[in-house]
Structure formats: structure tokens, C-alpha cells
Amino acid sequence: MSSDFSRSNRSFRPESLMMSHGYDPKLSEGSLKCPIFQTSTFVFTSAQQGKDFFALAYGKRAAEPGEELGLIYSRLNNPDVQILEERLSLWDKAASCAVFESGMAAISTVFLAYLKPGDALLYSRPVYGGTDHFINKVLPDYGIEVIPFSASDSYDDLVRLTQGRPIRLIYAETPANPTNALIDLSMCAQLAQQLSTPDRRVHLAVDNTYMGPLWQHPLDHGADLVLYSATKYIGGHSDLIAGAVSGSLEAMLPVRTLRTFLGNMASPWTSWMLMRSLETLKVRMDQQALNAARVADYLKEHPKVERVYYLGHLTPADASYEVYQKQLSSPGAMVSFDVVGGESGAFAFLDHLKLFHLAVSLGSTESLAEHPYSMTHADVDDQDKIALGITESLVRLSIGVEHADDLIWDIEQALTHV
Ligand SMILES: *Cc1c(COP(=O)(O)O)cnc(C)c1O
């Protein structure tokens, strides 16, 4: 899939390459855009070629210098899937990327690829509800011990928590949904290194859905794998479900191999849709962040708002300010806030929105609002919710690309009903 577009030695930025990278029009009748290769299988030119392709696919022979695996069957490889992966990997400067039919498919495949019976998983809490369910309701059935930690735990706390436990994988989601709590990734990477032995490497995997792939690059902070629900910012239009994992060739090999046999790769159609989304990723996310800053500043001054959770409001007096400075290049576009009046205050606000949609999910062009306590985090233990700051007053906003003045108008009028 090597690109014919490298007309100079300049190393273009990812946003400049999203329309062309990895695609050669000569291979597709000169079509400017990559076609949808809606096919299950590919024709070999000879029996010998089929034999050669399979020998490489199953590791029975090494690749010739510069040789890429030929097209065989769409569960193993497909041009739309591969070109998408090449483009997506540019944002995190990853050597390898694999796309999945959902974010949960990406996350569960990483867990199953890295954890075996008798292993232990250290994971940050809170995590996405589906991830929490997989960790606490599925992994223990496979003989895997799961140990949670939180953003407020220090390095020494983590050393104590993991003492004598057979940790194999550390999993972090940061910023945490819905409170924007931050986990220090270089601290986690240091712990992974500390817990590794020569014959047992501990890996660090990070769910970067909230910030990525633009505003936080976990691989630069020592992570081995970076995971996405591509349903969110990467897809960005609330019209598909997809996931992705990126990392080094070595870290990705078990993930890619398991994906081949679980068969949970993204389809050609979903991959084509995601390629289209990637062309506008940077302009969308930049605008969403600008709008979020306006909305957060407005909320902060409103008498019916008790507290705003927005990373752009952190000051040097906040414990997570240092992590924010070193790990993130933007405060992002997710804003949560406590409204006066508990659940009835939050519901009155949500029920009177005219431009925001009352829906879960995030990162898309349209602004969304939801009630984490009773919706996305309904399954989390009530006591845990309160400890994590997820109260009945909390509303979560995902800010889209509308005009900021219209979003603020909508919030203002909905708050009059609280
Ligand atoms: C939505 C989401 C997921 C799950 O992704 P799906 O595409 O819905 O399977 C995982 N992590 C985070 C942070 C999410 O927001």
C-alpha cells in the first residue's frame, strides 16, 4: 500500500496526510479517493503466489526485504482496513495499528491477548462502563485477578497495592469519564518497568478515547499500547461503531494475531467511513476544544452551577496540574458540571435543551448532554459513584462544532427551568 504521494522529503504533519497516505491511485483505475473494497476474498495470480502469501501469513517464511503480505482474505487483510490503519498510526507515531468493529472489541482483545489464568491486572478507576464490566464480570471467570487504583494513588501506594501480585498488564483510562480526573502515565510506565522481570514483561495499555488521537500521546509517556473507541472523536459523526489499538510491532503482534482468530476486525465499509472522518479530524477537534472553553467559562460564572469539571480551569494549586501540563496539549472538549437541585435540577436542565441532544456517547460534531449517575454510570456502585464525584447533580456535556454562542444560549435557557 505504499504511497505515491511522497513527492518531497518533507515530513508532512498527520492532518496533511489524511487525504492521501498509504493509497496509490494507480492501483485503482486512477480513482482519487480510495474505493470501498467490498470483497471477502482476493484472487491469486498463480497457485505458487497463493502458497507464498500463506507461508508469510502463517510465519512459515520470513518476509523478503520490503515485502508486504499480499491480499488473501478480508479477515486477514483488506485495503480499506490497512490504509486506515496506516493513517491512524501517524497520529501516535506508532509502528503498527489494528482497527476493530467496536471500542469494546479493541479493549477486550487486548485483555485476552495479554492476560492468562493466574495473571493479575492493575487498572485505573473509574473506567468506561463496558470496560468495567469486562474487567470485573468476565476476566475473573478466566482466573484473572483484578486490582483497581485511582488518580489519587501515589507511586508508593501502587507499589504497595501490587506487592507480591503477578501483575502482567497495567491499564489506565485518562482523563477519566466523566470527571476528567488525570492518571500520571509516566508513573504507570515506571511501575510497569519496576514490576517486569527478564522473562516477564509488564505492559502498559492506555484508553485515549477522551483526548485522542490529537491531544494526548500515551506512547510518548512510556505506554506500550494506546486504545480508542473510534466511535467517538475519530469517527466523529455519531454514525458508526469502531475501535483501534496502536503500538510497537512487538506489542501489537499478540493483538493482531488474536484479532485474526476472533474475527472482530473493522469491515471495509466502516474503515472507509473512518478514512473519510480522519480528513476532518483536526479541524473538528480544534473547533470542539474552542467551543468547550467558551461553554466551560460560561458555566463557571452561572449561579445555578455549583462546580465545573473542565481541564482548562486547572491552576497550579490543583494536584493534577503538573500531569495536565506534561501529558496533554489541550483541555479537550468534555465538560461536566454540578447543577443545583440534585437529580430534579439535572433532569430539568436536560429536558429543556433545544440544540444539545440528550444522548450518551461523545466526541461527535453535534453537542450531547447526559446524566452519568443514572445513565452511563448506572451500573457503578452508588457509594463508589459518590467517592468518584459522580453525584446526582452531575451533567456531562460533549461539545460539538456548532456556534459557541448558540450552545451558550441553549444552556442559558435550559438553566432557567432548574
Ligand atoms: C465509548 C467508549 C468505549 C467503548 O467503545 P465502543 O466503541 O462503544 O465499543 C471505551 N472507552 C471509552 C473511554 C469510551 O468512551
Image (cartoon, grey):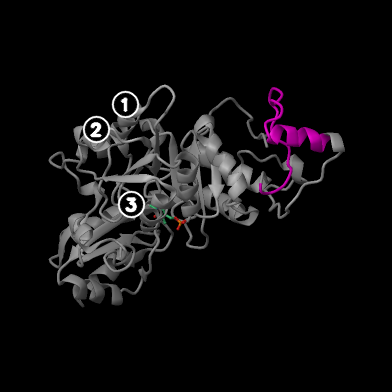
The reply to whether the magenta stretch includes residue 225 is: no
Q: Earlier in the sequence, mark 2 or mark 3?
A: 3
| x, y percent for residue 387 | 18, 55
Q: Is residue 151 left or right of residue 198?
A: left
Q: Is residue 317 above or below residue 195?
A: below
First in sequence, mark 3 or 1: give its number: 3
Where is residue 159 drawn, in percent x and y?
Answer: 24, 32
| Residue type pointed to by label 3 | Val
Q: Which residue is mark 2?
A: 159
Give, as a three-letter code, the residue at label 2: Val
The residue lying toward the viewer, choosing from 79 and 98, is 98
Q: Answer with the quarter of the image where residue 117 lies.
A: top left
Q: Disc 2 or 1, which lies upstream in sequence?
A: 2
- Say what secondary structure mark 2 lies in: helix
> In the visual, does 194 lie left or right of 17?
left
Q: Residue at x 47, y 44 (%)?
A: 110
Q: How far across and how far down the image is residue 14, in percent?
A: 50, 38
Mark 2 and mark 1 residues within 8 Å of each other at the beta carbon: yes
Instruction: Estimate how packed mark 2 is, as few (under 14), some (14 to 19) or many (20 or more) residues with alpha carbons within 10 Å.
Output: some
Reading the image, the residue beneath label 3 is 127
> For the N terminus, which image quadrant?
top right
Which residues lie in the magenta part? 49-75
Give yes or no for residue 72 being in the magenta stretch. yes
Q: Is mark 3 within 8 Å of ligand 1?
A: yes
Within 10 angstroms of label 3, few (less than 14), some, or many (20 or more) residues?
many
Considering every residue shown, the one lying at the far right of the view is 46
Spatial separation of the CA atoms under disc 3 and disc 1? 24 Å
Between label 3 and label 1, give the one nearer the viewer.
Answer: 1
Q: Which mark is residue 194?
A: 1
Which circle, 2 or 3, is nearer the viewer? Answer: 2
